[in-house]
Amino acid sequence: MRLAQVLDILQELHLAGGHPEIAAVERFGTDTAPGGPSPAGLRLRYTTGSEAYLWGAVWPGETPIPVPENLPPPSRRASRAAAFAAQLLDAARPSAFRAWELVALKGLGPAEERGKVPLGLRITCGDGTALLLRATAAGGPTREPDSEPHPEYRIPA
């Protein structure tokens, strides 16, 4: 399975998920496989103007971590994006994927939590192909809240 197909599925899940803080889900980049000069991925644009990205990457040192019941706060956009994608996959269980894991990545995260926070998603496709999507973020014009802005939101069935 190719990176573009994985991104198609994740884009569809994000759109179907209808999270009230996500204003747009768009594709970017041209690479057909992780690790190239024009990383392909998804851009999640939030109502606050900030953005998070899930993109095909190659990164040494993944540590599987449990999917949290509650998302990290919006002030941790990259971790929040990775965790939300994992929650969407857990809810939808797309048949094109054999497995997925939320992962921490060696050397990444806040200084006191390096390698311990969700910043990636390892997806194993039905054909055995395994891809890593790394999560990164960019701030918007306003400061992100440290608490959950939409506690009533639930992933649709």
Image (spheres, rainbow, N blue to C red):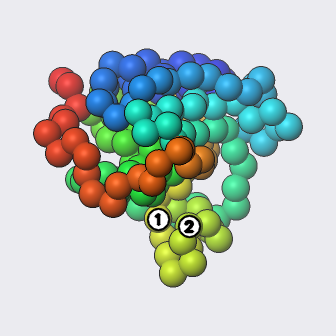
Q: Which part of the image, by quadrant, shows the N terminus?
A: top right
| Residue identified by numbered label 1 | 117
| Left or right placement of residue 100 versus residue 148 in this view | right
| Left or right placement of residue 54 versus residue 143 in this view | right
| Percent of width and height locating residue 152 | 14, 39
Above or below — where is 153 with respect to 24? below
The secondary element bearing badge 1 is classed as: loop
Of residues 13 and 101, the one nearer the viewer is 13
The secondary element bearing badge 2 is classed as: loop
Q: Residue at x 58, y 30 (%)?
A: 42
| Residue identified by numbered label 2 | 109
> Which residue is situated farthest in the left direction here?
152
**Quadrant of the rendered structure where residue 51 is?**
top right
In three-dimensional space, the C-alpha distance between marks 2 and 1, rounded to whole angstroms, equals 6 Å
Q: Is residue 44 visible?
A: yes
Q: Are marks 2 and 1 in contact (CB under 8 Å)?
A: yes
| Left or right placement of residue 12 versus residue 139 in this view | left
Of residues 47 and 63, the one nearer the viewer is 47
Three-letter amino acid code at disc 2? Answer: Gly
| Percent of width and height locating residue 151 | 17, 45
